[in-house]
Amino acid sequence: MLDFMGRLRTALTGSPDTPLVLLGNFEVEEEWARDEPGLPRVAFTAGSAVVHRMDAFTLLLAGKNDHVVLKGAPDPDHLGHLEELGLDLPRVHTVSGGDPGRTVTRDALADPALQEALRALGPDARIVPHGTSVREEELSALTGLPLGTPPAALCKAVNSKVYSRAVAEATGLRQAPGWSCENLTELDAAFEEARFLLRVGRRVVVKDAFGVSGKGISVLDDERRLDTLRRMIDRRAARSGDDRVVLVVEEWVDKTTDLNYQFTLGRDGSVHFDFVKEAITEGGVHKGHRFPAPLTTLQLDAVRHAVEVIGQRLAADGYFGVVGVDAMTDPQSGLYPVVEINARHNMSTYQVRLQEQFLGPGSHALARHYPVRLRTPLRFGRLRALLGELLFTGSGGGLLVSNFATVNAAATEDGTPYEGRLHGLLIGDSPRSLERTDEAITARLAALGQEDGA
């Protein structure tokens, strides 16, 4: 039976042995959103240096016959630790002259030497990004390596929240009451419905079709804010002479638990349900995952039904590859199976290989990140000594560090304090054991910041 990566290779390329070139172009949504009139804002700007170093998650997805393109060389001690755990690691290609404020794809497009190295891999390899935009199509053309994904235009289309609502409506899947808006006339109608909800004491959320991680979302609780938002949209339309919008307006419904589930869709339309996890969010921003998810049999059956019908619709529209869907439960134990569809890799995608290798029956896991306040770059060897017995060693429990590059991504040369993120997977035999380990790690990392003078 094929493991996840074998299934993914087969779904993308038709063979479980095709070598992949993985790109961790996180926040690809910024490329999809360019020139799209969503919520008024200053502009879509380059993401933070820390977010762009999430590209190193690809080390945990690729195998020994694969390749990853990274913005910077990994810490050798962290690579050694992953090898000690028995993980087969890919060949690493590092860009030169990278810019911390841009994605790894844009760095690769500015590096002819890297392009030549990728060209030398031959046409059998396939480029598989976190998500496919026109930038990845440009890199494919420059290197001669085919993309192992659908075209950028299709990937963009199916990742719009407008598309998500259309799929839920067409398939009869429950979703929050709401309206998709693609022009000012549709927005007028949606805002009138929203105004009624506000008058009876409900809240309303307006979402950018390509927003991500808490960006491009506005929660409204009174008509004054609704009117202010509409005036801003009107002013933009008057300046541009364009009455288009790409927005979703929804009632803010009560929820109990955020969920994320994933399936893999083959070129032949085959659907494989991968998992469902409890998503940990704060202010709309993703913070991690807890699994197994605490679902009833009825809720799990509803998730599996949603996987089948969403998969059929995506396949009919020509999409194939990884699909992650955000969902939530309500206080009455009901399910909203479609909050939004993410037809790309998701944070939870990069945990699957670790799940398969290290989580047995009865295991519990919590994927999360820790803020780390520093003045000088932290080496993995020092972190390993600090964590001691709390570091996962291949059996039992502890923290498996899944991305170390994000710790020092924002480091400065002048010793200015900076905040990094330590990403990891906590493994234990019960939810309580995860809590104890989490508390102990938090305390030790706080002490690290004090030692560093940050």
Image: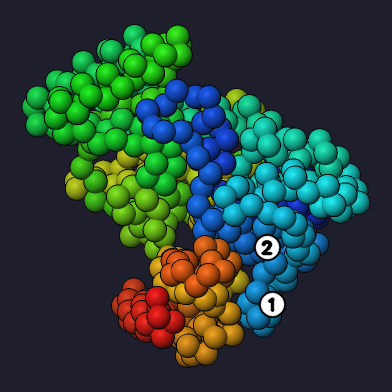
The answer, for residue 200, to whether it is visible in the render is yes
Q: Position of residue 412 (x, y in %)?
A: 53, 66
User: Mark 1 sits on what residue?
Assistant: 76
Quadrant of residue 448 within the rendered picture: bottom left
Q: Position of residue 300 (x, y in %)?
A: 39, 50
Question: How is this picture coloured?
Answer: rainbow
**Which of the numbered marks, if any, corresponds to residue 72?**
2
Q: Name the residue at the front extreme.
A: 414
Helix, strand or loop status at disc 2: loop
- Residue placed most toward the observer, 313 or 126: 126
Residue drawn at (34%, 9%) of the image:
185
Q: Position of residue 431 (x, y in %)?
A: 34, 73
Q: CA distance from mark 2 to mark 1?
A: 12 Å
Q: Amino acid at mark 2?
A: Gly
Callout 1 environment at 10 Å: few (<14), some (14 to 19), or many (20+)? few
Q: Position of residue 338 (x, y in %)?
A: 39, 37
Residue drawn at (39%, 41%) of the image:
215
- Residue placed most toward the observer, 299 or 418: 418
**Left or right of 20 in this view: 261:** left
Name above or below for residue 51 compared with residue 379: above
Name above or below for residue 10 compared with residue 384: above
**Left or right of 406 in this view: 132:** right
Is label 2 in contact with label 1 (beta carbons under 8 Å)?
Answer: no
Q: Amino acid at mark 1?
A: Pro
Q: Name the residue at the left extreme.
A: 200
Residue drawn at (61%, 42%) of the image:
131
